[in-house]
Image (cartoon, rainbow, N blue to C red):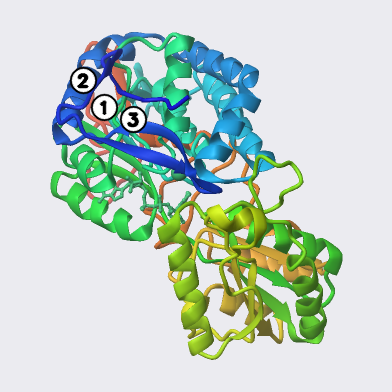
């Protein structure tokens, strides 16, 4: 049953020039190889960029609504194949089926939203300051877009990038994460079936430092849309700055949820369990810190420990399982090293703190849901992204103190506040430094038609989702049409040239 995959370059399934391959395994059953993939290098990237460059002109001349029709068709195919894609995704990267179905649905939502934007992509028309002159701006395609994606949302994140890029009229060279090449290959297969012409979407599998870097460095790649770690994002930004290449960076997070003493504690508890342990904590928007008002601190930590210790771990294909494995061995080892640091630095381990290896779990990269209490802001586990099922709990004495703790990291992606006090809620909305703030809902749950992204070292200011994504994938062209049949000079012919006289000329 073992499937061997190839790159898709210029509409053709292509072997790598080197002939090298890599295998991808199921993190819940490490004996199970889910696919063999090409391990490409810079030469394969060259071929893909050439193909994308050649396909660009024709694709850019296709009307945007028709480009949208193709993306909509891709969404329709995803609807028909939703369950099958979700199952493959669970086998590939371990998230439970409930969540992988959600991941595919996010791709579908993005398809339909992006397709509809093909009939908007609004520019601006405004009155000219001169007579008989017309002004407008419009969005125009850019060229070849490099897309580099992480493994935690193997369908949703590539679609956030590829669908708006396609509707914008760009062509694509796509390098998916090495842990989720199978879902990426399925997405490209769907786009081909939907009618994307040859060369418009190209996929090059392989490692970040070889394939990813080659895309970033390529002179004919006009823009790069990257989601991943802050460390790699900084490298990309450094390289791109030399050619002034446009890059969109969606990077790490250290998101916190605040629970005030007047909150509905049962609701906050549900939110925290979903936010911290959903996707095994491997979300950029995962709740990694919990900030609890001192009046309810002891009680709430007890409630949380009781519920979290009962979460069912296992293979995500089993519908009763709530928490899947870490994505790979290195990720589990990284999680455990943070747990060791937390203990050394004096945080109180409440539950978990070790790999889960019993029974059915022995051949997977499972880690027990872990809670540290009495965490203080200077501790490593309060500051660094762990990307695993580890929650650091801190105590606050007021809403302002809680917000100060929440803001005390280099990241600023998502945040959540549970309170029934409208004043505290609005103060939090104003003062929290994050791209996303939820009131009475967990830190996860973005909707695709709304802007998504973070402040500080979570990114470089761009937003995915919603119409803003189209600003990244297009250039803005401003057009002036003068139909006066004479030279008209803006600023000069508009107002009197006499010093001290700013009256309008006739
Ligand atoms: P990562 O190691 O930075 O990898 C992300 C992607 O970049 C992968 O495709 C990777 O390829 C590639 N890559 C690695 N090194 C590269 C290089 N030197 N040049 C170009 N590309 C390179 O991140 P990850 O471990 O996959 O994902 C987890 C991180 O992503 C977390 O920090 C998380 O917070 C962040 N994330 C952010 C968002 C957001 O929207 N803000 C969403 C999801 C995840 P390989 O797979 O081959 O290494
Ligand atoms: Mg895998």
- SS for dot 2: helix
Q: Residue at x 30, y 44 (%)?
A: 247
1 vs 3, front mark: 1
- SS for dot 3: strand
Mark 3 and mark 2: Cα distance apart in space: 20 Å
Mark 1 and mark 3: Cα distance apart in space: 16 Å
| Position of residue 240 measured from the top left corner of the image (x, y, whole percent) | 20, 47
| Mark number displayed over residue 28 | none
Q: Are marks 1 and 2 in contact (CB under 8 Å)?
A: yes
Q: Nearer the viewer, residue 9 or 218?
A: 9
Q: Residue at x 70, y 42 (%)?
A: 318
| Mark number displayed over residue 144 | 1
Q: Which residue is mark 3?
A: 476
Mark sitting earlier along the chain (1/2): 2
- SS for dot 1: strand
Residue 486 drawn above or below residue 460:
above
Mark 1 is surrounded, within 10 Å at the Cα level, by few (under 14), some (14 to 19) or many (20 or more) other residues, namely many
Q: Nearer the viewer, residue 268 or 96?
A: 96
Mark sitting earlier along the chain (3/2): 2
Residue 294 drawn above or below residue 452:
below
Q: Residue at x 24, y 56 (%)?
A: 235
| Mark number displayed over residue 53 | 2
């Amino acid at each position: 049953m073992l499937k061997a995959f190839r790159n898709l370059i210029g509409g053709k399934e292509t072997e790598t020039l080197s002939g090298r391959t890599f295998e991808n395994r199921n993190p819940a059953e490490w004996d199970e190889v889910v696919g063999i993939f090409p391990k490409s290098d810079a030469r394969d990237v060259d071929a893909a960029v050439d193909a994308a460059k050649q396909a660009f002109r024709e694709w850019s001349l296709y009307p945007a609504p028709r480009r949208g029709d193709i993306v909509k068709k891709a969404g329709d195919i995803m609807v028909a194949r939703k369950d099958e894609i979700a199952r493959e995704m669970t086998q590939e990267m371990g998230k439970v089926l409930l969540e992988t179905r959600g991941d595919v649905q996010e791709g579908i939502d993005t398809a339909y939203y992006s397709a509809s934007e093909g009939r908007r992509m609004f520019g601006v028309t405004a009155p000219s300051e001169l007579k008989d002159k017309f002004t407008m701006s419009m969005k125009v395609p850019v060229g070849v877009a490099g897309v580099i994606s992480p493994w935690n949302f193997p369908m949703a994140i590539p679609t956030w990038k590829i669908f708006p890029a396609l509707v914008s009229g760009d062509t694509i060279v796509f390098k998916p994460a090495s842990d989720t090449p199978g879902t990426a290959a399925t997405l490209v297969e769907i786009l081909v079936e939907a009618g994307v012409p040859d060369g418009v979407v190209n996929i090059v599998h392989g490692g970040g430092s070889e394939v990813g870097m080659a895309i970033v460095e390529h002179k004919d790649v006009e823009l790069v849309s990257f989601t991943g770690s802050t460390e790699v994002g900084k490298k990309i930004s450094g390289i791109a700055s030399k050619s002034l290449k446009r890059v969109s960076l969606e990077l790490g997070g250290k998101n916190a949820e605040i629970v005030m003493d007047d909150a509905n504690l049962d609701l906050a508890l549900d939110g925290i369990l979903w936010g911290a342990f959903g996707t095994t904590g491997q979300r950029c928007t995962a709740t990694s810190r919990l900030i609890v008002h001192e009046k309810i601190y002891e009680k709430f930590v007890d409630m949380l420990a009781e519920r979290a210790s009962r979460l069912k771990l296992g293979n995500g294909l089993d519908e009763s399982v709530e928490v899947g494995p870490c994505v790979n061995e290195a990720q589990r080892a990284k999680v455990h090293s943070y747990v060791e640091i937390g203990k050394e630095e004096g945080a109180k381990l409440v539950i978990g703190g070790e790999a889960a290896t019993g029974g059915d779990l022995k051949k997977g990269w499972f880690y027990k849901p872990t809670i540290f209490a009495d965490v203080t802001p200077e501790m490593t586990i309060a500051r660094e992204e762990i990307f695993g099922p580890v929650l650091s709990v801190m105590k606050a004495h007021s809403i302002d103190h809680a917000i100060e703790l929440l803001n005390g990291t280099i990241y600023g992606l998502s945040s959540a506040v549970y309170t029934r006090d409208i004043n505290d809620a609005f103060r939090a909305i104003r003062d929290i430094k994050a791209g996303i703030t939820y009131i009475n809902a967990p830190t996860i749950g973005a909707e695709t038609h709304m802007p998504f992204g973070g402040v500080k070292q979570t990114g470089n200011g761009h937003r995915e989702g919603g119409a803003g994504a189209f600003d990244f994938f297009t250039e803005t062209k401003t057009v002036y049409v003068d139909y006066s049949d004479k030279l008209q000079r803006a600023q000069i012919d508009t107002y009197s040239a006499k010093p001290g006289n700013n009256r309008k000329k006739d």
